[in-house]
Image: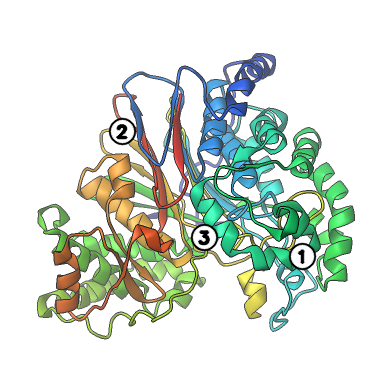
Amino acid sequence: MKMKMAEGNWDPMESNSFVDGVRAGLTRRELAGALAMLASAISTGGCAQSGASTQGASASTTAPLHGIVAAGAKPAADAGAAILSAGGNAVDAIVATAIAMAVVDPSNTSIMGRTHLLVLNASGECDAIDGRSMVPAAWHAGDKATDRAGVVPVGGNPRSFEHALQRFGRLTMEQVCAPAIRLARDGFEVPSNLARVWSRRVPVLQRNPVAAKLFLKEGGLPYREGEVFRQPELAASLSLYAKGGADRFLNQALTRDLALLQAAGSKLTTEDFLAYRPIDAEYIHTRYRGWDVWTIGRQGYGFLVAQTLELLQAYDLRLMSAADRWATMLVAQQVAFKGQRDEALGSNASSLLDRNRIQMLAQRVRAILQSSNASGLFEVPPTKPGIPQDTTHISVVDAQGMVASMTESIGPHFGTGFASPNGYLFAHSYQMASGQPDPDGRDVTSMLPTILRSPDGTLVALGAAGADKIRGAVLRAIVNTVDLGMTAQQAVAEPACVIHNGYVQASRELDPSVRMHLQRIGVTPRMVGRSDGDHFGVLHVAKRHADGSFSGGADTYWDGGTALV
């Protein structure tokens, strides 16, 4: 187990800098020209002709091309693929995709949202950027906010995206923003799942006049599936960001934003935004069945995910029936996560990986499975479960072997529902809403971008959306990939179980033996079908195989897509 601490308490695992190793290649003029030629492809929802794009499905090729992008919206994946075709690397592509996601999925992200980015370069050096949102300097523990403007934090995305490009990228911000600006200006067709959520959140958007004007049609109606949604105000804001960077964008945008926010009760100030800086994030490096695994540390409960993987090492999941495998995975995860949340976020989180502790937990997992009695380990599902609250994830791998994995969030769907006249929604801070912030002032999140590398050199970027479902989805993708040898799309789309709010949620598409076995050992699952509007953690996976070919998978429980060039 290797770890890098953002605070510098432990020695870094590896060098933090690999900028010089990726900046060689096309000149900026050549890159700009290539990107310009691709702009028309983006405007029609397509991609470079040398690539392929799919929605809610896999993409693969045997040709050594530029790379692959998997994201929560097809047009955003296309935007990232265009950047790869123009000579950008995986970080250029993931930032372009993230900015495009702020255009085409306003329910889950925003230019004023938060992010976590994990990067692995071709030499195997890992770095992470913590772009979580922050509470205002004037906000103190116990100041539980009661209105939407009062829970708006300092968004981390503007400076985090800029920092990522400056540190790891090849292209300029202007080049990387170009596809998103075009999408905002020309519009995109609203897909089915976004339309469903949009309809559900109408009351939230109606409460803010600016949000109602920008994100609802005449009469306060939501945009429907297939309708074109254009955002000229956001296009102008992104153009300002592209040309002037974060400083100019924030200085100009805040003139209007802060007046509205402060009038509505916010404690945010200009100084809060100008002082914000992304930081080097803590990450963990461990091994699972010979594969290297990198993921976020305490900020995303990564220590507990690593602990769960250690518990699973004792079982040959390949040889198990689906019923036994799911029981083993769920029990191991719940034993790891139940009662250890606070420790996982604390300064002594590394103790969760102490050998003696893992052996003690392993004995408990074994005892539960051998006795076929997991009663009391899981909660009973509620009769009326809450509405899903999501994030969004992007995975990219390029032809040079750089891997980037990023998760973004604004809290509940459409964030606070409080909008800027500049065209974007503000994020919601759960910590400000609860009155219990993290000691460092940054929002505690479940974001868990992850990277895998096999012994033969296969590279995998993966991650998920879905609040506390994220960790279970990430573990599922690792097991499906490493233990079961599934393709990227199989790893994403295979019927699943997930732990949510302490209870088990299971897909109706699973073999009935899974549900019956869980019930036999004292677990009452909540059965969910595709028509129920819920999910099991929305996964997106991008893979570069050892032979240089690519494949990817986008979760069909949302409007995701893959783009290959």
Which colour assignment does the render follow?
rainbow
Q: Give the image quarter of residue 359.
A: bottom left
For label 3, the residue is 390
Q: Which mark is residue 457?
A: 2
Disc 3 is placed on an element classified as loop
Estimate the spatial distance between the alpha carbons at disc 2 and disc 3, rounded to whole Å: 32 Å
Q: Position of residue 217 (x, y in %)?
A: 71, 52
What type is the residue that disc 1 sits on? Asn
Q: Position of residue 241 (x, y in %)?
A: 77, 39
Disc 2 is placed on an element classified as loop
Direction from residue 436 to residue 212 in the image, left or right: right
Does 79 sit above or below residue 428? above
What type is the residue that disc 3 sits on? Asp
Q: Position of residue 389 (x, y in %)?
A: 52, 65
What type is the residue that disc 2 sits on? Gly
Camera-near label (2 vs 3) is 3
Q: Which mark is residue 208?
A: 1
User: Does label 3 or label 1 sit earlier along the sequence?
Assistant: 1
Query: Do tag 2 and tag 1 residues touch (Cβ < 8 Å)?
Result: no
Q: Pick the residue in front: 508 or 483.
A: 508
Disc 1 is placed on an element classified as loop
Q: Pick the residue in front: 482 or 559.
A: 559
Direction from residue 455 to residue 440 in the image, left or right: right
